[in-house]
Amino acid sequence: MNVKEILQRTPPRILYHYTTQQGLLGIISNQEIWATHTQYLNDIREFRHATELARQELSSMPVEESSREYVSHMQKALLGEVEAINVCVCSFSAQGDVLSQWRTYGGAASGFAIGFSGEHLREIVAEWGWLVPVLYEEHEQRLLVRTLLKDLIEENRNRSPEERLSTPRSGNLRAYLNRYAPILKHKSFREEDEWRIVTRPLPCVNERFSYRPGPSMLIPYFRFPLGKESLGIQEIVVGPTPHPEQSIRSVEGILTKNFIKVSSSSEVEGVVVSRSEVPYRNW
């Protein structure tokens, strides 16, 4: 497996971001989408899962004598605060009408799946990070982690004595783990068919790095500017609701108010607003 190839994969034509009424209004009004710090996501186990895989692979892989000291420093680094780097993620799905997504992200009978152009997302992310598919199968995850560790060992071998003096003894392990950990998820989540924006490490002083109130603490996040008049939006799916037609009309209204063209067909330029076909009632 070529690790960097994952960062360069072509996204689907449309990727859907599931959100609430407040989320939809914020995205359209502010012309931006938020990526949350990895350590403040709902499930911190995602990052710990990747760290544990790295520990297991590092302890089992054969290592040449000349690299043993370096590997020892990598193992020690995995016992420390690997998470203490500002990396932010934002989630999308290749599927625009999935029950589990409505239940998790749609709110109480008022959710939306905003369908963005996959290519547009990749373009706006390029300056700050990557748009990457999530890997669900354990054998793929282990292969990725194993390849990453081998690349790191080789990277260290090729450093000059001067470069080694200015680089942590564990090399770029912390930075690389923060880059790839967000795309390793348990196979039980495969239905989500997820892609993620993953940022490079960000300084707190970046003008787009901000904080918002959370249930129990302030949440760090990064504000991605969406650009373009249409914001790259191709479609908006109105989630299960007792008032689908009224909801569709109000979504079309807010788009028009913000000078985003609405269309009744995917064959005609503009945003298509449709309703969910999922037979789900939460009211």
Image: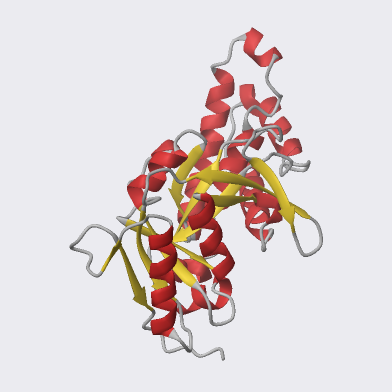
Q: In the rendered image, which quarter contains the N terminus?
A: top left
In the displayed structure image, the side of residue 251 where residue 168 appears, left or right: right
User: Image point 43% across, 40% down: which residue?
Assistant: 124
User: Image point 34% across, 74% down: which residue?
Assistant: 274
In the displayed structure image, the side of residue 51 where residue 122 appears, left or right: left
- Determine whether 38 is above or below 205 in the image: below
- Of the pair 153 and 67, the residue shown nearer to us: 153
User: Image point 28% across, 59% down: which residue?
Assistant: 270
User: Image point 51% across, 90% down: which residue?
Assistant: 281
Identity of the residue furthest to the front in this view: 257
- Of the pair 30 and 192, the residue shown nearer to us: 30
In the displayed structure image, the side of residue 67 where residue 102 appears, left or right: left
Is residue 214 visible in the rendered structure shown here? Answer: yes
- Of the pair 217 and 53, the residue shown nearer to us: 217
Q: Quadrant of residue 234?
A: bottom left
Q: Position of residue 56 (x, y in %)?
A: 64, 49
- Determine whether 191 is above or below 164 in the image: below
Q: In the rendered image, which quarter contains the C terminus?
A: bottom right
Identity of the residue furthest to the left in this view: 267
Q: Position of residue 197 (x, y in %)?
A: 50, 48
Identity of the residue furthest to the right in this view: 216
In the displayed structure image, the side of residue 52 where residue 24 appears, left or right: left
Q: Position of residue 225 (x, y in %)?
A: 50, 43
- Of the pair 187 and 255, the residue shown nearer to us: 255
Is residue 20 visible in the rendered structure shown here? Answer: no
Q: How many marks?
A: 0
- Determine whether 263 is above or below 206 in the image: below
